[in-house]
Amino acid sequence: MSKLPKAHRFTDLSDYGRKPAQYLVNILKDTTTTPVQVTLLFFVSGIVALYCIYTGHYVLAAIFLVLKSILDAADGELARVKKTPSYTGRYLDSILDIVLNALFLFIIGYVTGSSVMYIVLAFIALQVQGTLYNYYYVILRNKLDGDTTSRIIETGSPTALPGEEQTTVNILFYTYKLLYGLFDKLIYTLDPKASDGKIIPNWLMTLVSTFGLGFQLLIMAVLLVIQLPEVIIPFFIGYTILVPICILLRMKF
């Protein structure tokens, strides 16, 4: 189930897990399985991938990284099919993502002998890239009357939706703000008028989708399969050069 009207559906290179996720959701939609349970499953998949990287089983690690992306797509898909959107799921998903991202880079840095400085730089780069993608995608969805569970600017804890507890939403919201706040502020400072401009063209969204977490994990998986884990950290540091380029391209519209 797409989040966008047909005319504005772009080729999302980070969303390759959507089709298998839909297949999985068709199996789960009439069960008692909840979207949050699927979110927890992608966290487990990520932990298994970490162990595989640590033990040098890079092909297995790649498989579990891709599986993590599929499950990451499936939780939101299941929420839409069951018509049970929640801020609990939205924030928990993002919190687990950033925790896994930090762990992925730490383990990769550890097994390749990278310095702590480069690991930290790669983590910052990874998050800045992902934040720009999410920022533009949420703006696009809001403009086109799509899913509004994600907000352009996270200012205060939202009112809990039916079926979730306000206390849980509050805790997850403030945890989210602690982990993502600086990245959100940075991207908003770099392009504060993005939501006021014209609808971002499909080709630009496709380019920006290479910053999406799914594509980032795919890059990690490919480099692990071809036995080049030492390239992962410098790649993400260098790839950040495209962030200001994409922002300048967006400003032309």
Image (tube, helix red, strand yellow):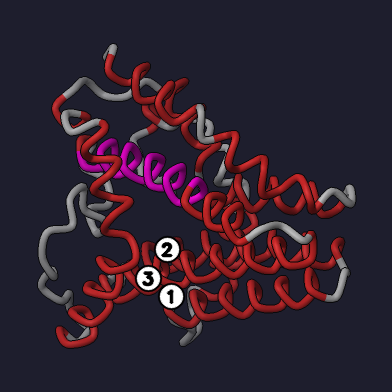
Judge left or right: residue 176 versus residue 21. Answer: left
Distance from label 1 to label 2 (Cα)?
7 Å
**On screen, residue 59 above or below 211:** below
Of residue 160 and residue 214, the one placed in the foreground of this image is 214
* Marks 1 and 2 close (CB-CB < 8 Å): yes
* Marks 1 and 3 close (CB-CB < 8 Å): yes
SS for tag 3?
loop
| Residue 239 position within the rendered picture, expressed as x and y whole percent measured from the top left | 58, 34
Distance from label 2 to label 3 (Cα)?
10 Å
Residue position for label 2: 76
Of residue 206 and residue 189, the one placed in the foreground of this image is 189
Q: Nearer the viewer, mark 1 or mark 3?
A: 1
Instruction: Give the image quarter of residue 135.
Output: top left
Quadrant location, the C terminus? top left
How dense is the environment of label 3, judged by Cα within 10 Å: few (below 14), some, or many (20 and up)?
some
Residue at the top extreme, as displayed: 252
SS for tag 2?
helix
Magenta-drawn segment: 125-142
Residue type at mark 1: give it: Pro
Residue position for label 1: 35
In the rendered structure, which disc, 1 or 2, sits on the residue that comes first in sequence? 1
| Residue 25 position within the rendered picture, expressed as x and y whole percent measured from the top left | 54, 67
In the rendered structure, which disc, 2 or 3, sits on the residue that comes first in sequence? 2
Residue position for label 3: 82
Q: Is residue 250 magenta?
A: no
| Residue 98 position within the rendered picture, expressed as x and y whole percent measured from the top left | 46, 65
